Amino acid sequence: MEIPLQFRLATESDLANIVEMLLDDPLGAKREKGAADFFQPYGDAFKQIRNDQNHELTVVERDGEIVGTYHLTFIQYLTHQGGLRAQIEAVRVASKCRGEGIGREMLSYAIRRAREKGCYMVQLTTDKQRPEALKFYQQLGFVGSHEGMKLKF
């Protein structure tokens, strides 16, 4: 019998687990910090996210253990007749649980949340260095309709 997944908003006590999942990836390991360096900036960001109704930082549990996370942001636009869209970011599945369908269930849940909020679109980005993630999102129906660009400071 498969143990069902539980979805809930993250609490401050989940931060260490979330950051560990962000670090457990070749790209994340280059930009995130763990252990003693972690609490202040991540804690400050968490408080802002928690206090903004347009953000949902979600954790996914199986049998009481956090096995995934993602961040859903609701963005109000003037385009599309003043429509609301959802942005999915920081999608991570614990490395020991990858390939078990958790990511598919997470994205399905995030899309349902976006529909419940009245969004007309869900969008996400994935790094070009992650071809397996690109293929995964395409299998879920996401279409590469735009070319994204970033300017880092």
Image (tube, rainbow, N blue to C red):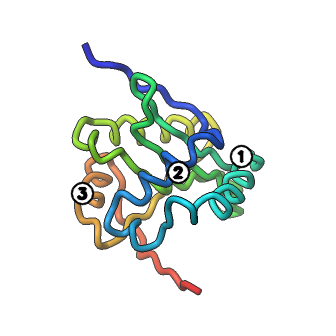
Residue 50 image offset from top left, x and y in percent: 71, 46
Kindly identify the residue that appears in the image at 67 percent across and 52 percent down.
46
Q: How dense is the environment of label 2, judged by Cα within 10 Å: few (below 14), some, or many (20 and up)?
A: some
Q: Which residue is mark 3?
A: 135
Kindly identify the residue that appears in the image at 29 percent across and 61 percent down.
134
- The residue type indicated by label 3 comes to Lys
Q: Is residue 120 above or below residue 26?
A: above
> Which label lies toward us, 3 or 2?
3
- Mark 3 vs mark 2: which is more N-terminal? 2
Kindly identify the residue that appears in the image at 50 percent across and 66 percent down.
33
- Mark 3 vs mark 1: which is more N-terminal? 1
Secondary element type, mark 1 = helix
Contact (CB < 8 A) between labels 3 and 1? Answer: no
Q: Which residue is mark 2?
A: 121
Q: Is residue 28 above or below residue 64?
A: below
- The residue type indicated by label 1 comes to Arg
